[in-house]
Image (cartoon, rainbow, N blue to C red):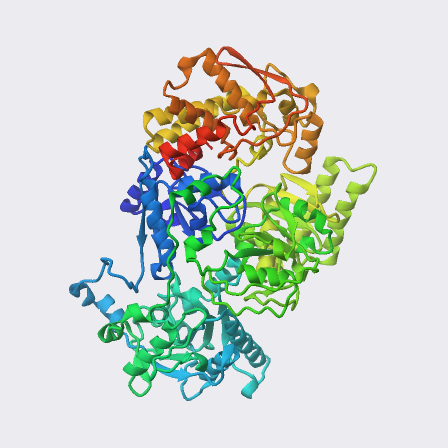
Amino acid sequence: ISKGIQEAKHQVLIQVAEALQSLGGDPTLPLDCAALRGGIPKETRWARTPLQPVLLCSTVDQIGSRLLHRGYGISPNSWPIQAGLLGNDTLIILDEAHCSKPFQQTLSAIERFQKKARHQLPQPWAFVPMTATPNDDRKTFELSEEERRETIIARRLEASKPALLLEAGKKGDQGMANTALEQLRDEDAALCAPGNTVLVVLNRVRAARILYDALDALAKRAQAGGKGAKAFDCIPLLLTGRSRPLEREHMLEQYRDRIMAGRTRSDNADAPPLIVVATQCVEVGADLDADVLISEACPMDSLRQRFGRLDRLGERGSSPARIIIRPELIGDAATQQAADDPVYGEALSKTWWWLQEQADNGTIDCGVAALDVLNPPMAELAAPSTDAPLMFPAYCNLWVQTGPAPAVSPDPAIFLHGPQAGPAAVNVVWRGDLVDRPATIWGEIISACPPLSQEALTLPLHLARAWLAEQHKIEDFGADIEGHDPQPAELNDADPRQALAWRGSDRSELVRAEQIRPGDTLVVPTSWGGADAAGWTGSNTGPVSDLCEAARVKAQRPAILRLCADTGPFPESVVGQFKQLSELSENEDPPEPSELKEKIKLCLEALHATCVNLAESDLASQGLAATVKVLHKEQPERWTYHPGGRGLILYSRKRLSDAIADFSDEDEDSSLVQKGEVGLDQHLEDVRAWADYIAGLVQLPQDLRDCVALAGHLHDLGKADRRFQAWLKGGNRFKVNPDQPIAKSAHIAQGAAARQARLRSGYPQGARHELLSVRLIEQFAEQAPECLPSDPLLRDLVLHLVASHHGRCRPWAPAAPDSKPETVTVTFAGRTLSHSSDTGLGRVDSGVAERFWRLVDHFGWWGLSYLEACLR
């Protein structure tokens, strides 16, 4: 959609593009798109400005946790920004709402609570539930009789989908997988005729994996020339939520002409049958179109979703299906004793009984029109759905406290999935350059090339903990439903294995199994195993591919190439070259930059020649080839020695495309990462102008627009501290010019260099320049009261926006003792302002917290966060 609007040639689309561009976002990008898959700090380009029109595709966990000021996997300092942006000027479309009743109730509560603010901002906010299987009395959009008679629609509605009802031969996941396999190989049924695409949907991830592994082994035997019972000529695919997005999308793209709606079936009439083994993940947002469906028995609403993937466009007219039930879940229809399924409760048994009653000789037509005629009682046969707890204002008061967060506050998970839901999932990223390197430097290694969501595999919390603790008896018996995490792991407290919990360059830490938090992103060595190209295995069957470079190519990020033996399929001759390059750093007499540059150039030429043959290889190799191609053509902008030794890291001059940089105002990062030095006066004026521009385009009332602009003009006065200035000069106090303070440094980057520079400068650990800015503004207000709002509440807003512009002071200011305070003097608007660097605002009685609560009461929980986002 975004690309179509951006490259519009049709007059209507051109008008749409112009209308979107008028909102003030990126002029080259009328509509941005982003996915919130979770847990990857710094992947926040969508939040870079309130002006950019954005389509966000998100899970309930990711959007819900952010709305509740508790964004999973992101820094607490970013919580108010994302809550403010998502809680204002946003339309939330809740797809498959029948699967998300608790979240729908929470959204309704948010909608009510937004109206409790004394002063409501003009930004609209709404949500729309969408489902093909509504089970309440709410007024719904439906087709008219005239529309039902239209040829294209009628063909889809009238398509026949006869389903044979079967009972699995044995209990459990193995029994279900075996019965499905028998149906697939039944030559009389001919479900797997050449050219057919067969969709098999099972209720447990483990059952799907068992069936896929069996099919994969049989297919490989057939490809090797085998025949008989141990071979089966087919193409098996596994489609679950337990796979890395990059690999899943690559698989779907590779077989798009076999599985997606709108395909031309005759193009593959002679091809081996394609068998897609899937879980509940295909019930939501999947535009799949199968010729045959085998489904495990499930509640009626889920069943109708699955049959919507069979002959989706009605092109075949009639398509066969199977519905298989586990014998242990049949229950007793005669006595009305339904079996209690761990995922679907009694609804599964009751749906099976209803199907049996309606069936003719064990077969029932599950086409859209046919089921409409039978009129199944959806309220009785729908999957069970719990209610979210009642949301009280007191809970919002706890959640809105993000800096720092209270020691105890309500768990967002129960408001997103209901009280019986498990905690949010975590993400796992595998990296080759962690192999055989001490865990103590993993954070530094990953900081050099942070992870992206495309390379992260999502796991239920209990599975991640069990795997990290190497408790292999814990198997994946769960369903592929968000928030469904039924089993606590019994962990071995003595197990020493640790993973890196990536929370940004300065907040990442090594964690044991019991220390993993919901929403964490765990980075581990590829040698640990646990997954293959099809997804999660849980066992160490071999190293996992490192998708770092491939993910950056897919996300159109700046090219970064890690030249290490563990990160690519490079020949030994080439590996030897960059090992030699890295060893140059250990020499007492390091080479001249020009000499090193020439050696890197020669190395890239050799790599480029090697990578020419990798384009058709696996995903990891394709990513390396694309990255090498960019670096070979453009030459690296800079390079560093790999933190783990024996290698280099090369950074490109430009991005793999014209993609926009991440949003960042974390701590002092935005002060340290610059292409050139920026003076304080210039910076303050730039921020004032930009804040005023944003506040105007989002149509804030004039008094609030003036406050946002004024806060932008004053926010960094505290950077005039001589020690802070030395920090920006790399820690050298002699380079500081007190008459020309700077706001941005051109000398140091993040990480160890920044920490060393701060130590040399003498700037206190934990000190906050924004608190000193508040004290200097208070003095400015005494000298020039006419320059600040006369309304006490608006004056409070200016001071709060300055105090909170790095995410602190919500409600408490951080306490950072300054053992050697200095008097800081700065000239602003022709007036000399000065104050001690020991601000005293870290005290409980400083008034910072009281000011915060006055503003929350006036603008509301999401309104104040939005005003902060406009400045930040």
Q: Who is closer to the viewer here, 600 or 293? A: 293
Q: From this view, report whether residue 790 is shown above or below residue 639.
A: above
| Left or right: where 426 falls relative to 756 | left
Q: How many marks on residues?
A: 0
Which percent across, then down, holds residue 22? 33, 36
In the rendered structure, the answer to whether residue 622 lies left or right of residue 98 reads: right
Rendered location of residue 711, percent (x, y):
45, 25
* Residue at the image point whose x is 56% and y is 28% from the top: 843
On screen, 188 above or below 423? below
The quarter of the picture where residue 597 lies is: top right
Residue 67: % across, % down: 42, 46
Q: Nearer the viewer, residue 144 or 205?
A: 205
Residue 82, image x, y percentages: 45, 42
Residue positioned 47% across, 84% down in the render: 182
In this rendering, the answer to whether 91 lies above or below 199 is above
Q: Is residue 456 visible?
A: no
Q: Looking at this view, is 15 or 392 the one in front?
A: 392
Can you tell which quarter of the image residue 263 is in? Answer: bottom left
- At a point 45% along the width and 49% down the height, the residue shown is 65
Q: Nearer the viewer, residue 256 or 513?
A: 513
Q: Quadrant of residue 609?
A: bottom right
The answer to whether residue 179 is above or below residue 788 is below
Whether residue 164 is visible: yes
Name of the residue lying farthest toward the front: 845
Which residue is the extreme one toward the left?
146
